[in-house]
Image (tube, grey):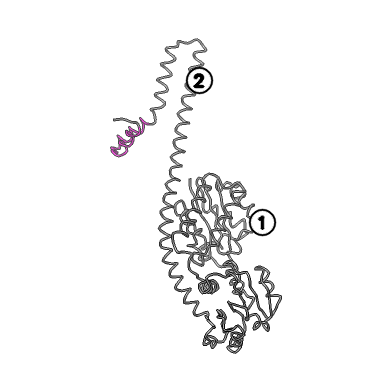
Amino acid sequence: MTVLALGINHKTASVELRERLAFTPERLSEALESVVTDGLCDEAVILSTCNRTEIYCFGELINSETLTSWLADFHLVPEQDLDQHLYVQRDVSATTHLMRVASGLDSMVLGEPQILGQVKQAYQQAKSMGTVKTYFERMFQQVFSVAKKVRTETDIAVNAVSVAYAAVTLAKQVFGSFDNKKVLLVGAGETIELVAKHIFEQGAKDIVVANRTLSKAKLVAEQFAAKTCTIAQIPEQMLEADVVISSTASTLPIIGKGMVENVLKRRKHRPMFLVDLAVPRDIESQVAELDDAYLYTVDDLQEIVAQNMQARTEAAEDAEVIIQQKANIFDDWLNSLESVDLIRDYREQSLAVKDELLERAINQLQSGNDVEQILKELANKLTNKLIHAPTSALKDAAEKQNVQELTAIKAVLGIR
């Protein structure tokens, strides 16, 4: 029995190719059913995200070339377009790979937490389709356990590795929590949307999004129950704001030293935390000269990100040790399954011999033949049938003078 992982990711393929091989939610069920009913494997899970498409299969004699052809045909992509982009992992390597993926060690951003939820979703969908059975049920539960262990016993996900998250983390370090704190976000692009997401998840409830175009501000605000305002209304909003984070495409500063100085006087010099994520700057650098304004720029945060990335890299080394240990243990279990199958097959073969000879003996008894003769014949034939294969193995090993094999056969047969 073999477990196989076949796929592409952000390291091996361009965005264009990843898009062509992505499984939409509508077609994922169809794909799971197809890969099993077409006889490619017994169990299957498909993980499809913006950064990777991976097919996990379990069964006998799984052929990676056949699976590649199926993948190309399913997406109507020429098979030659996949050359040099696909990777294949088998058995303990496949298990190790999935554990690394679920733990965030194979992500574009080292240690990012979203991938674990995506792996769980892929497993659940496959389970609902009936393509997760005994092996993958145990394998994926083990993978989830390992990912949890990695996150609780290492610092792989502790430190911020994006400027948006670093800005929120820094603000939280200053205030302890965002309870009863007002946050003003200036801009409505991808960075501010990411900041809004992080700060909302950290407990901020009083959020205002300021932008030149209110309709764009509302698109961000409605996701986090936030309010909106225009750029012109920023000074009034800053009167109550504890945190100001800005990221726009403006070529000139939006928040100047004079504006902040005036606001601080009206606030009776209550401190204000400001973060400028824009390039060119949205907040004049002279704001940092004011006693009650604490200004951080994107350069300040990049230093934090670089330090944190180094910390995550060091934590990843500890995570790799955990994963390798667990993957080896799981590989031992897979090997034990083959032993169970071998024992079952041997037992069924022996019982078949017994049933065949017993039926013949019963027929002879019903025909009135001599009972003692029937019993002797049954015993002899049963013995000869059962010792035939071991005897042949002993003779073969003896002729080859294979002492190690002879010793093993003797141990199995209980010969002293």
Q: Are marks 2 and 1 in contact (CB under 8 Å)?
A: no
Choose top left, top right, bottom left or bottom right for residue 187.
Answer: bottom right
Residue 251 in sight from this viewpoint = no
Residue 13 visible? The answer is yes
Mark drawn on residue 26: 1
Q: Which SS type dominates the magenta stretch? A: helix
Is residue 333 shown above or below 25? Answer: above
Q: Which mark is residue 126?
A: none
Local secondary structure at mark 2 = helix
| Residue appearing at x 44%, y 73% in the figure | 307
- Which stretch is magenta? 390-412
- Residue 326 place in picture, x, y as percent: 43, 52
Extreme residue toward the right, this view? 215
Determine whether, in the image, residue 339 is placed left or right of residue 256.
left
Above or below: residue 91 compared with residue 189: above
**Residue 411 included in the magenta stretch of the image:** yes
Mark 2: amino acid: Glu
Real-space CA distance between mark 2 and mark 1, rounded to the nearest whole angstrom: 56 Å
The disc, 2 or 1, on the residue closer to the chain's N-terminal end is: 1
Give the answer, above or below, for where 185 lies relative to 53: below
Place residue 261 in its image quadrant.
bottom right
Determine which quarter of the picture holds residue 71.
bottom right
Residue 55 within the segment the image draws in magenta: no
Q: Taking 41 as reference, is 237 left or right?
A: right
Residue drawn where x is 55% and y is 52% of the image: 66
**Position of residue 177 in the picture relative to residue 416 (left or right):** right
Residue to which mark 2 is pinned: 359
In this rendered view, identify the residue nearer to me: 275 or 103. 275
Amino acid marked by disc 1: Glu
